[in-house]
Image: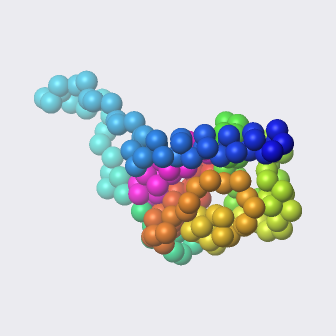
């Protein structure tokens, strides 16, 4: 077995181990506790009902406009060990997903893709990502992603809606 093949195998094992260890925990920090006393007036005015009801998914196409943003954020915990979503944050085992929608597969210059991803010819759309997330190995045989997929359609929609909002900022 060549050195390249051994390194790929080691990377796959490490990726699988990281994915297994990440579990379903919600990594989002909890909001800071209030430091004002209950009887003290608030320094900032309370949000109006309109401000409090802002939907981050408003304006997305169906079915993503009706998805659950918070559940999508929780689903992304499965992806976070391999992918970053912040602009300029670099890559992990998988490529940075910032700006992924409408990007041609296998073209992020700072990431080394599998031959399968480099030679595939499609743009990332919500529909393509949905099929990919259902079963990455079946969708694109020969890709290096070790993730088994998300069988539940609603969970995939929640995740895609979250990514549509967070990777476009």
Vertically, is 32 above or below 62? above
Residue 39, visible in the rendered structure: yes
Nearer the observer, 162 or 7: 7
The reply, left or right, for residue 127 in relation to residue 103 is left
The reply, left or right, for residue 75 in relation to residue 124 is left
Q: Residue furthest bottom?
A: 62
- The residue shown at (60%, 67%) is 135
x then y, percent, for residue 1: 81, 45
- The residue shown at (73%, 58%) is 143
Tell me if residue 67 is in the magenta stretch: no
The reply, left or right, for residue 120 in relation to residue 160 is right
Vertically, is 42 above or below 52? above
The reply, left or right, for residue 101 in relation to residue 119 is left
Name the colouring of the figure: rainbow
x then y, percent, for residue 22: 46, 43
Nearer the observer, 22 or 166: 22
Residue 161, visible in the rendered structure: no
| Count of numbered circles in the view | 0
**Segment colored magenta:** 69-85
- The residue shown at (48%, 46%) is 20
Nearer the observer, 36 or 116: 116
x then y, percent, for residue 151: 49, 69
- To which quarter of the image does residue 33 belong? top left
Q: Residue furthest right?
A: 119
Tell me if residue 75 is in the magenta stretch: yes
Q: Which residue lies furthest to the left in this view?
A: 39
- The residue shown at (62%, 53%) is 146
Nearer the observer, 67 or 13: 13
Vertically, is 44 above or below 153? above
- To which quarter of the image does residue 14 belong? top right
């Amino acid at each position: 077995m060549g050195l390249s093949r051994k390194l790929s195998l080691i990377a796959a094992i490490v990726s699988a181990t990281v994915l297994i260890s990440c579990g379903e925990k919600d990594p989002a920090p909890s909001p800071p506790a209030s430091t004002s006393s209950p009887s003290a007036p608030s320094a900032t005015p309370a949000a109006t009902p309109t401000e409090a009801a802002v939907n981050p998914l408003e304006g997305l196409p169906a079915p993503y406009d009706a998805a659950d943003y918070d559940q999508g954020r929780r689903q992304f915990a499965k992806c976070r060990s391999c992918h970053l979503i912040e602009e300029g944050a670099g890559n992990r085992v998988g490529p940075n997903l910032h700006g992924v929608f409408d990007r041609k597969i296998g073209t992020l210059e700072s990431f080394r893709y599998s031959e399968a991803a480099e030679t595939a010819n499609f743009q990332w759309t919500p529909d393509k990502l949905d099929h990919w997330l259902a079963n990455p190995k079946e969708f694109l045989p020969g890709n290096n992603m070790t993730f088994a997929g998300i069988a539940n359609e609603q969970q995939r929609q929640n995740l895609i809606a979250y990514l549509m909002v967070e990777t476009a900022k």
